[in-house]
Image (tube, rainbow, N blue to C red):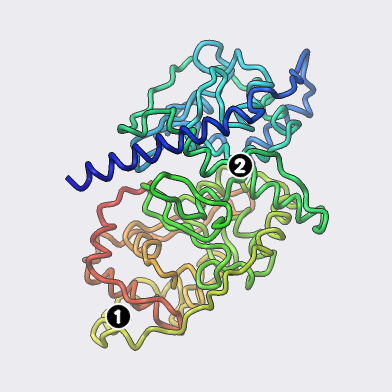
Amino acid sequence: MKRRVLTVFLVLGLLGLAAIGYVVWQAQPWTKLQPTTIRGPVAEDVISRGEYLARAGDCVACHTAPAGREFAGLRAMPTPFGNIYAPNITPDDETGIGTWTADEFYRMMHTGISKNGQLLYPAMPFANYTKVTRADSDAIYAYLMSVPPVKQPNRPHELRFPYNQRELLIGWRTLYFKQGEYVPDPKQSAEWNRGAYLVQGLGHCSMCHTAVSALGGSREQEAFSGGMIPNQNWYAPSLTSNREAGLGEWDIQDIVDLLQTGTSRRGTVYGPMAEVTFHSLQYMSDADVRAMGVYLKTLPPRGEARPSSQAQLVAPATMELGRRIYTAQCAMCHGDEGKGFPPHMPPLANNQSIEMATPVNPIRMILNGGYAPATRKNPRPYGMPPFAHLLNDEEVAAVATYIRVAWGNGGTPVTAAQANALRVVPIE
């Protein structure tokens, strides 16, 4: 009964926002963009630049199904509201974007409105892509028009009521969408501005590294403050807090290595971030990745200091069990004192990703293992095997607790229930 009442209030709230949004909508120039349609042959350098930019936007990751043809769509994107299926963006006339113009493509990138006038669901990161310049949008369009067309019909989304009512997206946009290309900050360097453009725009980094509301939106003032990635059960750490990934303490080269190579002296990427490095960041130029590092390092800190060790909160028996499991299963790669053998075998001591408030990521790593992505600069990465078949919930909790509080780490204890809750989560 309570759930039905909440649903009713939610629908009424969304309808109200939609009504307000409609007024705002009528005042916007979303359908009055100046046409600059690409005509005639497109230079190879434009197509090449478009391919690079499409890599920077990680388009292939969402628009390619497992074992599917590139950009042909049909990849399921689970959300709290149901599955969304990425569309075919190959230049097929019937099932892809073959009949789209450069103007229509830019309108989609800039405003989140499709060729047929439909509002796009924000699984498509148009709230970030709106920052992309017209020239870059045209280059991406030229590249997509050059890839082999694939005739593959799109699959309808499987969203529950009321989320399958696109009209309600007007309310969502009123709350969470601010249209406009990136405007350089004259007080910052050209390198910083390039990094900001890539991070805020094509990179759409805030989409994962910002907590989302019950309506699936995030506010600009909360950007990069960290959050659970919906339906994936991975935690994207805050990039502004020294309690989590706080990059203020990192050297820029360490940030560059992590983004582009997948490993650095400070840690290794796993889970969804490994996919971003594999599909996107490894192909970006050294200068662009460095620019992203320069920008990320200047994100304003939120003031949370790194916590002190919580070892006193752990029962001695649990600490001893965790130490024994660590010695038997982990020390060979991560060292007796947790210092690891960077960059290939990451340190666990003084590792902020280990001591975050939520223990989701370390529990998942223990259960499922993990492999850094194979990249051009690190083609044969080391990996971590899974231990779900060797350790029960109590043992997983004990060793996770041990590494979160040993060597001065400031994490909190992990319970067997927390380990069990993640044991059944599928590996992405």
Front residue of 77/82: it is 82
309 vs 266: above or below: below
Residue annotated with mark 2: 178
Q: Amino acid at mark 2?
A: Lys
Instruction: Tell me if I can see residue 274 in this picture.
Output: no
SS for tag 2? loop
Residue 317, image quadrant? bottom left
Q: Earlier in the sequence, mark 2 or mark 1?
A: 2
Instruction: Tell me if I can see residue 101 in this picture.
Output: yes
Q: Amino acid at mark 1?
A: Arg
Question: x, y percentage for residue 21?
Answer: 52, 35
Task: Give neighbour class at mark 1: few <14, some 14-19, many 20+ (Cα, 10 Å).
Answer: some
Residue 357, image quadrant? bottom left
The residue lying at 72 percent from left, 47 percent from top is 285
**In the rendered view, does 331 fall on the left or right side of 252?**
left
As measured in the structure, the alpha-carbon distance from the residue carrying label 2 to the one carrying label 1 is 53 Å
Nearer the camera: disc 2 or disc 1: 2
The residue lying at 51 percent from left, 72 percent from top is 243
SS for tag 1? helix
Q: Quadrant of the N terminus?
A: top left
Residue annotated with mark 1: 324
